Amino acid sequence: MKLIECPRDAMQGLAHFVPTDLKIRYLNALLQVGFHTLDFGSFVSPKAIPQMRDTADVLAGLNLANTQTKLLAIVANVRGAEQATNFAEIKFLGFPLSVSETFQQRNTNKSVAQAFVEVGEMQKLCVQTQKELVVYLSMGFGNPYGDPYSTELVTDFSGRLVDMGVQIIAPSDTVGSSTPEAIERLFSQLLASFPDVEFGAHLHAVPGEAPAKVKAALRAGVQRIDGALRGFGGCPMAADELTGNLPTEDIIEALTNEGVSLNLNQDAFQKALTLSAAIFI
């Protein structure tokens, strides 16, 4: 199981700016835990996401010498992707492609058709720079805008991405609307349709919902799950009040209870959990 820790997602909507040196301390603590990937920052407009305006400075302060954890940066357009590919330390670029036309406009100020064009350009850029593109299918479990939604639509989007060469796709429960049944149904269909693609679960939930959602993804065969310590975060473009990310501590407990072996440094995890209190105040 690949655990993806998402401090960027957790921090980006905070009202207060987290000082750069504190971000660096926190991320360096997380790098010692043993996560597969750290979603550490983003190259997006500082007007849109002020919290991430120091991503390059944060990256410069990370200690990557003694960790196997890989870095992922979120981008919102080709310009951001070009910025991110200038950094050899970054392995993955993440792009939010929405199944909802309304949300795509709200999130990246583009239509879905325009976003697909940009995905093609980003994929080519990643191939040229030896990086991998992770496409998050925002509103992957429905949307509050009345836009069309079905598991077949998500499968169609995934097929178009696969045709472009994208190999990591993460349906995302942007507003926390998914149920365990819907999670199992969607991922079962996707994994059966595209067995060579890595599908990840980026889910949101209200307190107490995470274990059931994790177990549903596991039953469907998912081997990649995103979380954030203490369950903070969510997309600030989606709504005024959002449910949070799946708490990483809940994910770990649920997977352990299901017999999944996780090679994590528990001491480092506790240190990171303690330090998180200084950020999420």
Image (spheres, grey):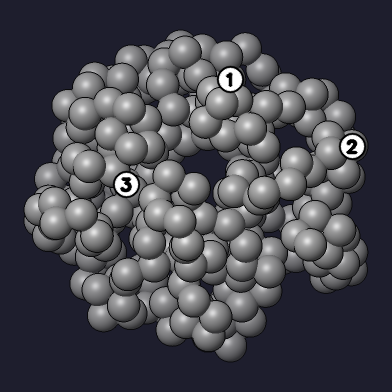
Q: In which quadrant will I find the C terminus?
A: bottom right
Q: Secondary structure at mark 3?
A: strand
Q: Which mark is residue 21?
A: 2
Q: Secondary structure at mark 1?
A: helix
Can you see residue 171?
yes
Q: Position of residue 246 (x, y in %)?
A: 54, 68
Residue in the picture at 32% in, 27% down: 109
| 261 sits left or right of 54 in the view | left
Nearer to me, 267 or 25: 25
Label 2 to label 3, Cα distance in Å? 32 Å
Q: Which mark is residue 84?
A: 1
Please tell me which of labels 2 and 1 falls first in the chain: 2
The number of numbered discs placed on residues in the rendered structure image is 3
Name the amino acid type tagged 3: Leu
Q: Position of residue 112 (x, y in %)?
A: 21, 32
Name the amino acid type tagged 2: Asp
Q: Quadrant of residue 84?
A: top right
Q: In which quadrant will I find the N terminus?
A: bottom right
Name the amino acid type tagged 1: Ala
On screen, residue 132 above or below 32: above
Q: Which residue is mark 3?
A: 137
Q: Position of residue 196 (x, y in %)?
A: 30, 47
- Dot 2 crowding, Cα within 10 Å, few <14, some 14–19, many 20+: few
Residue in the picture at 59% in, 48% down: 13
Residue in the picture at 42% in, 77% down: 213
| 267 sits left or right of 281 in the view | right
